[in-house]
Amino acid sequence: MRNLKQLKEEIAELKQELRAIIIAHNYQRPEVQDIADFVGDSLELSRQCTEVNARTIVFCGVRFMAETAAILNPDRTVLLSEGSAGCPLADMISIDALREWKQRCPGASVVCYVNSSAEIKAESNICCTSANGVRVVDSVANDDVLFVPDQNLGHYVSTQTKKRLILYPGFCYVHHRLKPAQVKLAKRLHPEAQVLVHPECTPEVIALADAALSTSQMLHYAKASSHNSFIIGTEEGILHRLRQENPDKSFYLISNGQICTEMKKTTLETLARTMRLRQNIVTVPEEVRVKAKQAVDQMLAI
Ligand code: 13P
Ligand code: SF4
């Protein structure tokens, strides 16, 4: 077993060898975030993938994120730091289910959350993230919008737009299981704190919050705010940057169950092994990639 210092040295050497950039999501383990060249939310990571000057992109996150990088970068090699890391929300919709829903809503534009497979993106008009859902939905041609696969983000967007949203019933288990009673208890324990939650939380939880924000929007909000304490309703990995960037402010989770086990599969060991063995290469069939890229490009253009 290599110690932390040796692992970091090996990753640095492999980075040179592979001419690689390491990109990590805000939910990754602190030591993984610290070694990455760029850390962000899904929208920032998608944008970052269009700007890389590297031969290899090593993605520390879950599969749909690495797939988005592969969709945008056909000429680069994309490695997923832990090959089995998926997103249970993204897996809740199959291509057959989407086609069936499309048939039932023939006059609707299809907006897919970025937490979806390349195949689902290829079958959608445009993609969105938690940071730009309202702008994306407002940009589509039709008044009716089929929104897949996250019902909670879709519901949140529906409260901010004139479009009529038809919601596919998917959800993220980490956010969906947060309960209003837990938020109320956290508010009683920290009455001075602002409540920031992710739009993947239920409408009942969002109703109790001061703001519903993507992970990076939470970071901007906490930094700019004159408040000194915050109750956080998203995956616990966000605490690392929140505390690093705001050493004088306090952050509390709503519950102790805010852990995405898929995001936590990546460790410095899995990252080093993936790079050493050049394994977990993520590819998307060209036919699917070209169509999926249109949905992602449309989003990045607005
Ligand atoms: P963000 O785009 O807000 O970082 O969210 C990604 C995600 O997977 C939320 O569960
Ligand atoms: Fe998917 Fe939820 Fe994990 Fe985000 S937190 S990657 S939506 S399972």
Image (cartoon, rainbow, N blue to C red):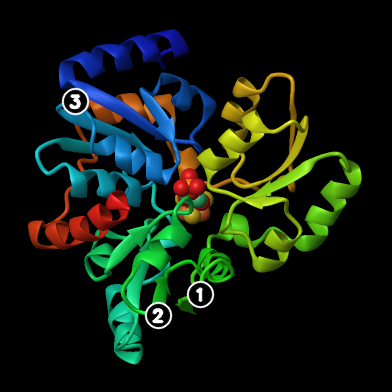
Q: Quadrant of residue 244?
A: top right
Task: Characterize the local packing of mark 2: few (<14), some (14-19) or many (20 or more) Cα atoms within 10 angstroms.
Answer: some
Q: Residue 119: in sight, yes or no? A: yes
**Is 69 drawn above or below residue 163 in the view shown?**
above
Name the residue that disc number 1 marks. Answer: 162
Tell me the number on the disc at residue 53: 3
Residue at left 17%, top 16%? Answer: 17
Name the residue that disc number 2 marks. Answer: 143
Mark 1 falls on what kind of element? loop
* Alpha carbon separation for disc pair 1 and 2: 8 Å
Question: Are the two marked residues, 1 and 2, in contact with CB atoms closer than 8 angstroms?
Answer: yes
* Alpha carbon separation for disc pair 2 and 3: 40 Å
* Residue nearest the viewer, comparing 286 with 110: 110
* Alpha carbon separation for disc pair 1 and 3: 40 Å
**Is 102 drawn above or below residue 128 in the view shown?**
below
Q: In this image, 161 relative to 256: left or right?
A: left
Q: Which of marks 3 and 2 precedes in the sequence?
A: 3
The kind of residue tagged 1 is: Lys
* Residue nearest the viewer, comparing 159 with 120: 159
Q: Which of marks 2 and 1 precedes in the sequence?
A: 2
Q: Quadrant of residue 121?
A: bottom left
Mark 2 falls on what kind of element? loop
